[in-house]
């Protein structure tokens, strides 16, 4: 357990950040699941997945190359070709 005042404050901050990160991660998973279950050419599902991936990358939940790879995978899965 944290002893110093600054360590206690850092612990509180990390718990606060964890709540936001968990929510973002859940949104990302749901968007990717919706994209997997969507029909080919569904632009709405593709847009939602892209937005969730971009937000996760922007907030540091994933690396930019991981985000690019996932976006490519979603785009390929929903492409009409």
Image (cartoon, helix red, strand yellow):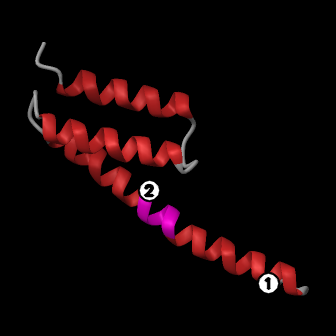
SS assignment at label 2: helix
**Majority secondary structure of the magenta segment?**
helix
Residue 8: mark: 1
Magenta residue check for 22 = yes
For marks 1 and 2, give the one nearer the viewer.
Answer: 1
- Residue receiving disc 2: 25
Q: Residue at x 8, y 34 (%)?
A: 39
**Of 68 and 32, the residue lying toward us:** 68
Point 40% across, 31% down: residue: 70
Query: Residue 41 placed where, x, y %?
Result: 10, 27
- Residue sitting at x 57%, y 68%: 18
Compared across the picture, whether 76 is left or right of 17 comes to: left
Please say if the residues under marks 1 and 2 sit with CB atoms less than 8 Å apart: no
Under tag 1, what secondary structure? helix
Does the magenta portion include 77?
A: no
**Figure quadrant of the N terminus:** bottom right
How far from the left and from the top, in percent, is residue 81? 13, 12
Reply above or below: 10 against 26: below
Residue 47 seen in the figure: yes
Residue 35, image quadrant: top left
Q: Is residue 20 left or right of residue 2?
A: left
Q: Quadrant of residue 3?
A: bottom right
Q: 17 or 69, which is in the foreground?
A: 17
Residue range corresponding to the magenta coloring: 20-24
Determine whether, in the image, residue 56 is placed left or right of residue 79.
right
What whole-number distance in Å separates the C-alpha atoms at marks 1 and 2?
A: 25 Å
**Figure check: 74 above or below 81:** below
Categorize mark 2 by other alpha carbons within 10 Å: few (<14), some (14-19), many (20+). some
Residue 72 is situated, as x and y percent measured from the top left of the image, at: 35, 24
């Amino acid at each position: 357990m944290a002893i110093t005042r600054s360590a206690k404050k850092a612990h509180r901050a990390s718990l606060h950040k964890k709540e936001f990160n968990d929510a973002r991660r859940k949104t990302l998973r749901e968007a990717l699941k919706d994209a997997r279950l969507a029909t080919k050419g569904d632009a709405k599902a593709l847009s939602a997945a892209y937005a969730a991936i971009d937000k996760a990358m922007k907030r540091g939940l994933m690396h930019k190359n991981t985000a690019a790879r996932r976006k490519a995978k979603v785009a390929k899965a929903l492409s009409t070709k």
